[in-house]
């Protein structure tokens, strides 16, 4: 914050949004990425409405229960990320690194549960182009496309959190960097709040 | 990392925990609705409404939008809503495809 305020004062004007430039940049990224996820979910809706025989493959056990656990794990990781940001703003490096480590661990747990779900489906004969239930093959394409894009975001988030935590520990980054990383992580969490009901619960049997 | 504490703006951890409990409860409500034997359209509307509430709460509290200058929200949200409104134009074609299938 201090550096951006100094830069703004040096330029003779205040930032119009009153936030650091890196925070504004991550908000821009989040806006653009929201449109990407919005587009892919709209495409999923289009294909689902237009398909004659859309499959509803998810039984409560194991798929929906697995999805509930994944959702709670991801929500909890947002909470631990907030604890990391709070610790960073207090200047408590040890707690910042610890909470970021727990967040990364929860993110990795989410990814592991997700991959377990995928491999179960592969074992049942699902693929992006195959539907073992005999319905529309587009189900696999949209399911693996949407959840795969989200999983990619989670994986990148976990890696980013680990790198930022390492640099915070070495004293090279500030609380602003932790907060910016947190914004990305919360966004990944919020996207899942749409993916879980639309892709899992709408296809529950 | 700088050892100088930075001024905090935003809610306390207690508020965050309350928000987290609220979000988990909404997820529970979504699961119950999914097994309430509602018509597909009604279920979709309910799930979307709850997801929007979750996103709104997450944006305001977890992402601190409530505690930033209002200008930031006014700059971000309407633009995104406009983009999603444009995407809505595909639905008539999806329903046309569905109608072409016949009964």
Image (cartoon, coloured by chain):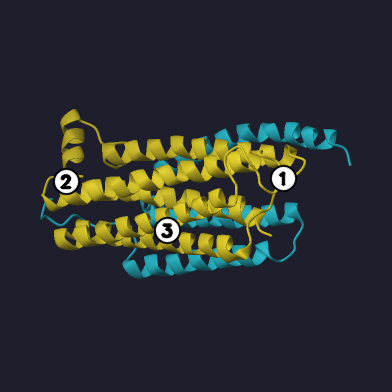
Chain colours: A yellow, B cyan
CB-based contact (under 8 Å), mark 2 and mark 1 = no
Mark 1 secondary-structure assignment: loop
Which residue is denoted by mark 3 in the rendering? A74
Crowd tier of the residue under label 2, counting other residues whose Cα lies within 10 Å: few below 14, some 14–19, many 20 or above? some
- Residue A23 in percent (x, y) is at 30, 41
Which residue is denoted by mark 1 in the rendering? A134
Q: Nearer the viewer, residue A5 or A182?
A: A182
Specify whether A148 is left or right of A2: right
Mark 2 secondary-structure assignment: loop
Q: Earlier in the sequence, mark 2 or mark 1?
A: 1
Mark 3, chain letter?
Answer: A
- Residue B51 in percent (x, y) is at 56, 54
Specify whether A92 is left or right of A126: left
Disc 1 from disc 3: Cα separation: 33 Å
Q: Nearer the viewer, residue A136 or A154?
A: A136
Mark 1, chain letter?
Answer: A
Q: Earlier in the sequence, mark 3 or mark 2?
A: 3
**Which residue is farthest top?**
A11
Q: Nearer the viewer, mark 3 or mark 2?
A: 3
Crowd tier of the residue under label 1, counting other residues whose Cα lies within 10 Å: few below 14, some 14–19, many 20 or above? few
Q: Is residue B81 in view from this perspective?
A: no
CB-based contact (under 8 Å), mark 1 and mark 3 = no
Badge 1 and badge 3 in a common chain = yes
| Image disc number at residue A173 | 2
Q: Nearer the viewer, mark 1 or mark 3?
A: 1
Q: Is residue A33 in view from this perspective?
A: yes
Q: Is residue B96 above or below residue A148?
A: above
Residue at image coords 60%, 62%: B30
- Residue A63 in percent (x, y) is at 57, 60
**Which residue is farthest right?**
B103
């Amino acid at each position: 914050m201090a550096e951006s305020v100094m830069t703004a004062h040096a330029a003779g004007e205040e930032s119009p949004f009153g936030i650091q430039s890196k925070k504004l940049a991550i908000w821009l990224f989040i806006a653009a990425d929201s449109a990407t996820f919005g587009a892919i979910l709209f495409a999923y809706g289009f294909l689902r409405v237009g398909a004659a025989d859309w499959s509803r493959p998810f039984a409560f056990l194991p798929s929906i229960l697995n999805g509930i656990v994944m959702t709670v794990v991801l929500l909890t990781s947002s909470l631990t990320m907030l604890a990391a940001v709070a610790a960073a703003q207090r200047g408590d490096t040890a707690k910042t690194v610890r909470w970021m480590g727990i967040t990364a661990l929860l993110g990795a747990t989410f990814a592991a549960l997700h991959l377990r779900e995928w491999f179960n489906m592969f074992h049942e004969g699902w693929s992006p182009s195959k539907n073992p239930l005999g319905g529309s093959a587009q189900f696999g394409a949209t399911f693996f496309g949407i959840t795969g894009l989200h999983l990619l975001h989670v994986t990148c988030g976990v890696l980013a959190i680990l790198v930022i935590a390492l640099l915070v520990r070495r004293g090279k980054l500030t609380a602003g960097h932790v907060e910016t990383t947190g914004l990305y992580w919360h966004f990944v969490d919020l996207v899942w709040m749409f993916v879980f009901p639309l892709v899992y619960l709408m296809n529950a049997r | 990392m700088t050892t100088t504490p930075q001024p905090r703006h935003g809610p306390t951890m207690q508020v965050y925990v309350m928000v987290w409990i609220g979000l988990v409860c909404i997820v529970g409500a979504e699961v119950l609705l999914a097994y309430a034997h509602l018509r597909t359209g009604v279920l979709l509307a309910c799930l979307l409404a709850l997801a929007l509430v979750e996103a709104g709460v997450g944006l305001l509290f977890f992402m601190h939008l409530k505690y930033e200058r209002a200008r930031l929200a006014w700059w971000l949200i309407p633009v995104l809503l406009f983009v999603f409104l444009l995407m809505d134009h595909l639905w008539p074609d999806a329903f046309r495809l569905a109608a072409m299938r016949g009964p």
